[in-house]
């Protein structure tokens, strides 16, 4: 056997760039690995993805040069795609959602990231995106949604995009100095939701009293009284229907006394976080009806449900079960009462009760915008934007 026919031995470890790059191959792998030293002295390991030594050397040097260059620019030593950053962001969002235990705006952000950002941007890097890329994404998004989104929807998109960027910065994937283009937040102005007039509310309250006692099926005889109480509580507090209202428990109620007058105070936690709100005095009658129907607490005196801080849900059937939704029953109530559609032809929903509360509080209750914003869990700016036309009406006696 000649010397030329012998296979050339490959070195097990190779030092490059004055020892700042080390190339090696594990015993059970055909691919070369490398570790390289960053400017701060820390070491990073990474595969070259190459089996041939000459290719592995070239790749290791390229990895090292790119990492040092990115460090000088204030970037992470390795590139991360939008999809990779989004995955980390979604994990954080899910942990926050689980901690709250209820649906919040975070659910909307999560859905936007998974349904829109990841499919479109995928393996692209945040730091390479341009304003043109963002505009093209927005055109694609609008086609996917088959409509031009309203400002409220666009605000959710900008908040979700900011979450992704914040994740990249906090994890060191990009520097906070890197300019990442923002999404547009100006869209079509949403239509004012239909409300009830004062006369229509009186008509609705009177109609519900008899309607709630009717129903052929057992479930109807349970859900109709519950809906009546639910509707009245929304009208008397202005809280959001759904997660905010349905999450209230008896322990979230307490008495608040001021100047010898006792007020009902309710703790709600929903879309914008937790807050205390003051219910109208009529809400106490709603609570008494709920207390009388709930078998597991009706033996307690009404006052005891407050002092004992009973942990049970407020809006539920007599057996303790809470229905998934009251939307369908409310729509039936609207049809039966003849109040489904307002004068402009818009269909009323449960949210109309919240809009009605705000409208009547400004027009007849004498509430100012800042107090109302605290009660309803909105910013004063948002209240003023939606109800600015009412503020002039409120001051008609001073303006005319």
Image (cartoon, grey):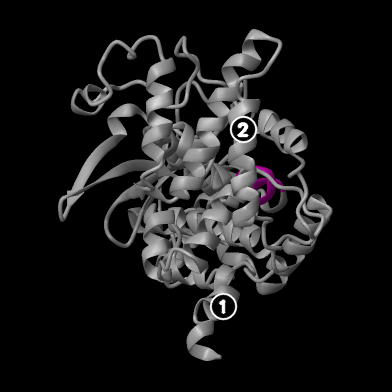
Specify the quadrant that holds the N terminus. top right
Side of 230 where 380 appears, left or right: left
Give yes or no for contact between labels 1 and 2 (Cβ–Cβ under 8 Å).
no
Residue extent of the magenta highlight? 113-119
* Left or right of 125 on screen, residue 78: left
Q: CA distance from mark 1 to mark 2?
A: 31 Å
Between 279 and 274, which is closer to the camera in this rendering?
279
Question: Which residue is located at x 38 percent, y 48 percent?
Answer: 280
Q: Residues within 10 Å of mark 1 (few under 14, many from 20)?
A: few
Q: Is residue 176 left or right of residue 198?
A: left
Residue at x-position 72% and y-position 51%: 120
Element type at mark 2:
helix
Q: Label 1: which residue? A: 393
Q: Which residue carries the number 2 mark?
A: 208
The picture places residue 9, in percent across and down from the top left corner, at 51, 31
* Dominant secondary structure, magenta: helix
Quarter of the image where one finds residue 303: top left
Q: Nearer the viewer, residue 241 or 84?
A: 241
Vertical placement of residue 173 versus 203, above or below: below
Mark closest to the chain's N terminus, 1 or 2: 2
Which x, y percent locates residue 335? 77, 36
Give how far across and how far down residue 76 sits, in percent: 43, 58
Q: Which mark is residue 256?
A: none
Number of numbered discs visible in the structure rendering: 2
């Amino acid at each position: 056997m000649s010397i030329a026919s012998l296979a050339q031995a490959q070195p097990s470890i190779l030092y490059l760039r004055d020892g700042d790059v080390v190339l090696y191959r594990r015993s059970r792998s055909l691919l070369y690995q490398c570790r390289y030293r960053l400017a701060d002295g820390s070491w990073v390991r990474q595969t070259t993805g190459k089996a041939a030594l000459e290719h592995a050397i070239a790749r290791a040097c390229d990895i090292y040069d790119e990492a040092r260059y990115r460090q000088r620019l204030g970037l992470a030593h390795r590139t991360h795609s939008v999809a990779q950053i989004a995955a980390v962001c979604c994990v954080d969002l899910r942990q926050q959602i689980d901690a709250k235990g209820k649906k919040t705006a975070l659910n909307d952000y999560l859905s936007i990231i998974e349904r829109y950002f990841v499919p479109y941007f995928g393996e692209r890097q945040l730091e390479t995106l341009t304003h043109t890329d963002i505009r093209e994404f927005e055109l694609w998004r609008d086609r996917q949604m088959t409509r031009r989104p309203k400002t409220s929807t666009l605000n959710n998109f900008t908040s979700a995009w900011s979450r992704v960027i914040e994740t990249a910065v906090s994890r060191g994937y990009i520097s906070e100095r890197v300019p990442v283009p923002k999404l547009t937040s100006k869209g079509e102005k949403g239509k004012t939701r239909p409300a009830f007039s004062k006369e229509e509310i009186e008509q609705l309250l009177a109609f519900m009293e008899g309607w709630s006692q009717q129903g052929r099926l057992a479930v109807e005889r349970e859900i109709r009284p519950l809906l009546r109480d639910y509707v009245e509580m929304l009208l008397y507090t202005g809280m959001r229907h759904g997660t905010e209202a349905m999450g209230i428990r008896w322990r979230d109620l307490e008495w608040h006394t001021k100047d010898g007058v006792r007020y009902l105070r309710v703790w709600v936690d929903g879309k914008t976080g937790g807050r205390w709100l003051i219910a109208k005095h009529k809400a106490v009658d709603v609570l008494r009806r709920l207390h009388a129907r709930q078998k597991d607490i009706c033996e307690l005196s009404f006052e005891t449900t407050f002092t004992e801080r009973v942990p049970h849900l407020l809006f539920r059937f007599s057996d303790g079960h809470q229905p998934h939704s009251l939307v369908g029953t409310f729509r039936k109530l609207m049809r039966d009462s003849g109040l489904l559609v307002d004068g402009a032809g818009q269909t009323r929903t449960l949210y109309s009760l919240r809009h009605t509360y705000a409208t009547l509080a400004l027009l007849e209750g004498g509430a100012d915008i800042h107090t109302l914003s605290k009660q309803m869990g909105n910013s004063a700016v948002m209240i003023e934007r939606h109800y600015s036309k009412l503020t002039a009406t409120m001051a008609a006696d001073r303006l005319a």
